[in-house]
Amino acid sequence: MKLKSLLLSIAGCIAFAPASFAERGSDGNVSIIYWQAPSILNPYLTGGTKDLESSSMVIEPLGRYDNTGALVPYLAKEIPTVGNGGVSADLMSITWTLKDGLLWSDGTAVTSEDVKFSADYCLHPDMGCASLSYFAGVTSVDIVDALTVKVNFDSPKPNPYGPYMGYTTPIIQKAQFENCMGAAAPNCTEANFGPIGTGPFVVTEFKPNDVIQMVANENYREAGKPAFATVTFKGGGDATGAGRSVLETGEFDYAWNLQLAPEVIANMEKAGKGVAIAGFGPLVERIEMNLTDPSPSLDADTRATRKAPHPFLTDINVRKAMSMAIDRTLLVEIGYGKAGKVTCDLVPAPDLYAANNDYCVKQDIAGANALLDGAGWTKGADGVRTKDGMRLSVLYQTSTNAVRQDFQALIKEWWSQIGVETELRNLSASVFFGGDPGSPDTFQKFYSDVEMYANTFSGTDPQSYLAQYLCGTEPRPESQWQGENINRFCEPEYDALHAELTKTGDLEKRGEIAIRLNNMLTKDSYTIVPLVHRGRVSAHANSLGGVVLNTWDSELWNVADWHRIK
């Protein structure tokens, strides 16, 4: 860890530490609202941010990224490095040691068996683990002693912090999950809805897509914490209602992801009940182009892979023209104001990995039309282009949200100007991001032509994030529709370049490779169409202390420090 990052981390802890914790649970109840309702509390079975964040209050990783992006130990004694001997000189292994005396919320000891099991659980061949990219290159996890494990890699890992770092790869209790391996994992409802954890809170009741009730963990490792005795974690509704519940009515203490027009938030703040907080990380609102045929006449396995290529989105001219038609500056203006920036990149931050492309900044309707004309797509009497009998008609889906529906309406109009017919669909965020293998409406199944959403990565290195687009990582029936390659991009050249990234230690060269990977997904292929580099905007009550917005990890990363300002 660089000295500057370490000092920033220490300074942050000092600056934001609560005044004191006289007694655990002395501050009563804290109310949190996520308008995208959690549907599961097992991060290994979901890619939904609302699920990852809510579960982070209960189950924890060995280390996290703080609000500056620095690596900080949580369940581990320290962050392993080459300097302290935790990372081998040949970069082929990393050794983690648990803190002494850690207990699960049921009072049993946390051991290296649990740490090893957490990796084995995700790496099970029949698992369909949503966090699999973070374990890329792991050959085994060996138990050294009761508190120590050694993670072995198949090649030197300049960045060995994929497993067990951040809220996507927490430690789960072996005793609770050992009968939930592989294909059985989604069926272990009791464990998936109420994991036994080491975090500051314990789940007492979970109603999927509705509400979670929690109580303070009496076995939490820090004396006097958490300050709150209970948590009401409400899900559902919309961003407007969530914002009002904190900023105007004071019904809730914390509201996440206020995806609202800036003037709407400003007007809510005038009520004086709370304050909006914002910060930029690598969060990007984008459109993904489906490279497979989503036709319902095809079987599930064919729709999940490129056995049946998309009938017209496999034409780069179509994808590029659809990108060219979009006015991103207007989208930022109406949707985010100062909390948004135009971006042409999937990875817009941190600076080392940001390509800072500008090819998409200016809308070019005329150029898009000329491109499609040259590619043989001709406009019919109804204004829709066709080629060889195939109409440019797309189903465009996203989650239900006022800003996203505004974006859909504008983009539909712009696409009509270039001869693309568009049907709009919006789905409940709890369903769209829910990961239910039985639902046809999840973003993982991608049963539409294009879809829009945002996601990000934990920490400051995008290696695992970019690994999501490797061949073979697509969601599919045999993985219970878990997977990360949502648009089914698959290029051997991309895979080879990513493999080079995993072996490169020089930071400047890592930046160069990551930028090339970013470009292969965006400006070279237009399989991903970035729209807005989004700042995270949330809100908390004036009476809630200890909140530190973190754009590199879970927003609830330091919920143990939250307290009521008297």
Image (cartoon, helix red, strand yellow):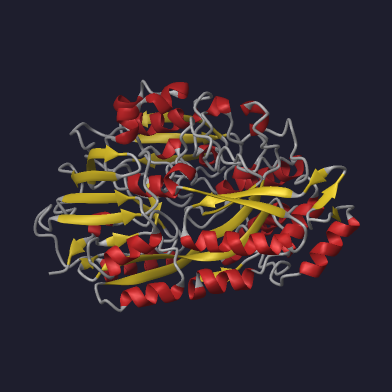
**Residue 206 image position (x, y, % from top left):** 27, 39
In the depicted structure, whether residue 539 falls above or below residue 101? below
In the depicted structure, whether residue 329 falls above or below residue 138? below
**Residue 436 image position (x, y, % from top left):** 46, 34
Q: Quadrant of residue 290?
A: top right
- Name the residue rendered at 28%, 35% in the picture: 194
- Give whichever of 237, 92 is nearer the camera: 237
Position of residue 430 in the picture relative to residue 346 (left or right): left
- Name the residue rendered at 76%, 44% in the picture: 493
Quadrant of the rendering where the N terminus is positioned: bottom left
Q: Quadrant of residue 274?
A: bottom left
Position of residue 92 in the picture relative to residue 550 (left or right): right
- Residue lying furthest bottom: 270
Q: Visible in this render: residue 511?
A: no
**Residue 73 image position (x, y, % from top left):** 35, 51
In the depicted structure, whether residue 139 falls above or below residue 20? above
**Residue 23 image position (x, y, % from top left):** 9, 55
- Name the residue rendered at 56%, 71% in the picture: 332
